Amino acid sequence: STWLVITFQLKSATPIGSVFWRFFLAWLIIFAWVLIKKIHLKYSMHAHRLFLFQGTFMFSINYMLTYLAETKVSSGLVALAFTSLIYFNMGWMKFAYKKKITLTTISGTLLGTFGISLIFNHELQRFNFSSLTVLGILLSVAATFSASMGNWASYRVNQMKVPVIAGNFWAILYGTLF
């Protein structure tokens, strides 16, 4: 569904403008929720650096690159490129946090990638190596890596026991302003 929304948004705004409006409106909704629920928002400078990192990579660069990729290749190919997110995330967990990657996780990941490939099989059959297509795929993979970096920061924020709504309040605000 996200891929369809992006395609719709690109018909009415530039990729960068679409990202700004998407997250500015999301932040306004979260802001209202934070006010209603009186959620605590005061955190250390260290936490704010992580919010900034998360927002920049997860809610800004990731989406800007994704929206730009959508102007070069079909949304199905972008979705296929995004299956690499789990591989990037597993890499972070293995190498940055020394977490064991189980055979079950690897099997599930491969099965999921295979399933997404089946769903977008028609996109794969029409794939060609034109410079525009290659650029779109490279933008998609770069967006996915950016999302993974944002996930790394989110994991660190979660380790600090920051509630998701409070962390996203700051991360989305910083990402929108970036």
Image: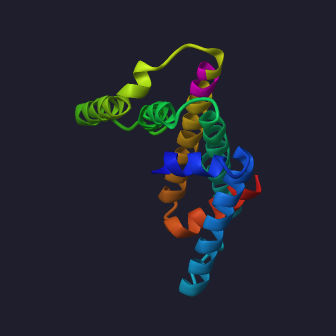
Q: Is residue 25 above or below residue 85?
A: below
Q: Does the magenta run of residues contain 93?
A: no
Q: Is residue 171 above or below residue 149?
A: below
Q: Main secondary structure of the magenta part?
A: helix
Using the rendered view, name the quadrant where residue 67 is placed.
Answer: top right
Q: Position of residue 23 (x, y in %)?
A: 65, 59
Residue at 71 percent of width and 56 percent of height: 20
- Visible in this render: residue 142? yes
Stretch of the chain drawn in magenta: 133-137
Relative placement, left or right, of 90 versus 168 is left
Q: Is residue 134 above or below residue 118?
A: above
Residue at 63 percent of width and 75 percent of height: 31
* Circle count: 0
> Is residue 172 or residue 82 the one in the foreground?
82
Q: Position of residue 150 (x, y in %)?
A: 57, 46
- Visible in this render: residue 43? no
Q: Position of residue 58 (x, y in %)?
A: 60, 48
Q: Position of residue 106 (x, y in %)?
A: 29, 31
> Is residue 20 or residue 107 the one in the foreground?
20
Q: Is residue 8 above or below residue 171?
A: above
> Which residue is farthest top?
129
Using the rendered view, name the quadrant where residue 57 is placed.
Answer: top right
Residue at 56 percent of width and 34 percent of height: 145
Colouring: rainbow
Using the rendered view, name the quadrant where residue 90 is placed.
Answer: top left
